[in-house]
Amino acid sequence: MNFFLLITIPVYLIVSLSFTSSYVLSPDKRDDKFKWGYLGSNGPAYWHLANETCKGVNQQTPIDLKLEDFTNPTKIELDITKEAELILLNNGYTYQVQQPGGTDKKPEMNYGATLKVDGETYYLLQLHFHMPSEHHIEGRDLLLEGHWVFQTSDANAKVAVLGVFFDLGENEDPSLKPIVDEINYKPLEVGENVTISMSVGEQIFKKIKTAYSYIGSFTTPPCTENVRWFVSPDVQSINPSQFKSLKYVLKYNTRITQKRIDGGEPTSYKPWKPDIN
């Protein structure tokens, strides 16, 4: 599904999918020096108090994308291994998928999943999700955004991130099914992980040939810059059942849009608050 043909989501449907959950991703459960989070006094508007880089020396991520950004896209080549045994973990901020071994902050490289661009090869480190989307399109956020984080294997360790939008449709996304199935069986507590069998985007990768590219940052503290971003114009479809399951655990975990170096202003400073009764 292309974003030029986005489905308008009725408000009553979104509200009807809201519900109470005891499995909120709580940053307070993590023993980090800075208890950053997404709402209130530890939310994105205050990250710079403990992480100076989050103020942004150059370009920070996410940004509000314009339709013209996609008129001259960058060609990319994505490759992915078939279904494999991977780790799904709740790191306190999102659900993350990675290779067995390593930690949530230092994942092992997946040499079977690559992003190739301009003669360089990046290897997948991990996949995680933000709800609603962190990037906006013409001022609008979408239901979900997946981030595939890649890194080169050389000493310079360049980082690239592929951003993929998901919005509401009739059909479920098969690449998310193993994650949703695990959530429906038993949501993970903070710090808990489980082994699942899945591909990290085989069906999605087949569709993506180009993307809007810019130099930005990580969207979580310490907001490290010089990250090469690739945002796909192809919006994937998730059905109401998948949305409901993902919202059950993700709640709200999105950084507000940042000022673009080309002059584009953030689309909002007040984060969207999920309807949790």
Image: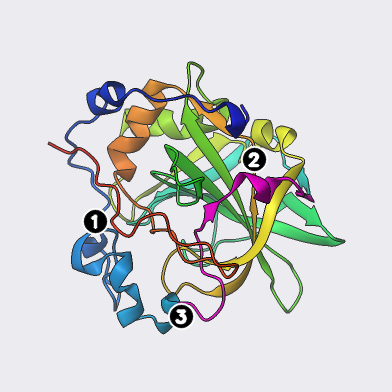
Residue at image location 40% in from the left, 33% down from the top: 182
In-front residue for pair 172/59: 59
The residue at which mark 3 appears reads as 53
Picture quarter containing residue 229?
Answer: bottom right
| Residue 209 vertical placement versus 7 (above, below) | below
Classed neighbour count for the residue bearing mark 1: other residues with Cα under 10 Å, few (<14), some (14–19), many (≥20): some
The residue at which mark 1 appears reads as 26
The label nearer to you, 3 versus 2, is: 2
Going by the numbered disc 3, the residue's amino acid type is Thr
Residue 70: say if magenta: yes
Could you say where residue 257 lies in the image, as x and y percent from the top left?
A: 43, 59
Classed neighbour count for the residue bearing mark 2: other residues with Cα under 10 Å, few (<14), some (14–19), many (≥20): many
Q: Is residue 111 left or right of residue 236?
A: right
The label nearer to you, 3 versus 1, is: 3
Picture quarter containing residue 120?
Answer: bottom right
Going by the numbered disc 1, the residue's amino acid type is Ser
Could you say where residue 52 lies in the image, as x and y percent from the top left?
A: 40, 83
Classed neighbour count for the residue bearing mark 3: other residues with Cα under 10 Å, few (<14), some (14–19), many (≥20): some
Q: Distance between the residues labelled 2 and 1?
A: 32 Å
Q: Is mark 3 on a helix, strand or loop?
A: helix
Q: Earlier in the sequence, mark 2 or mark 1?
A: 1
Q: Distance between the residues labelled 3 and 1?
A: 23 Å
Q: Is mark 2 on a helix, strand or loop?
A: loop
Q: Which residues are the magenta region? A: 56-74
Q: Earlier in the sequence, mark 3 or mark 1?
A: 1
In-front residue for pair 234/240: 234
Point out the residue furthest to the left here: 277
Could you say where residue 70 lies in the image, as x and y percent from the top left?
A: 69, 46
Going by the numbered disc 2, the residue's amino acid type is Pro
| Residue 90 vertical placement versus 154 (above, below) | above
The residue at which mark 2 appears reads as 233
Image quadrant holding the N terminus, namely top right
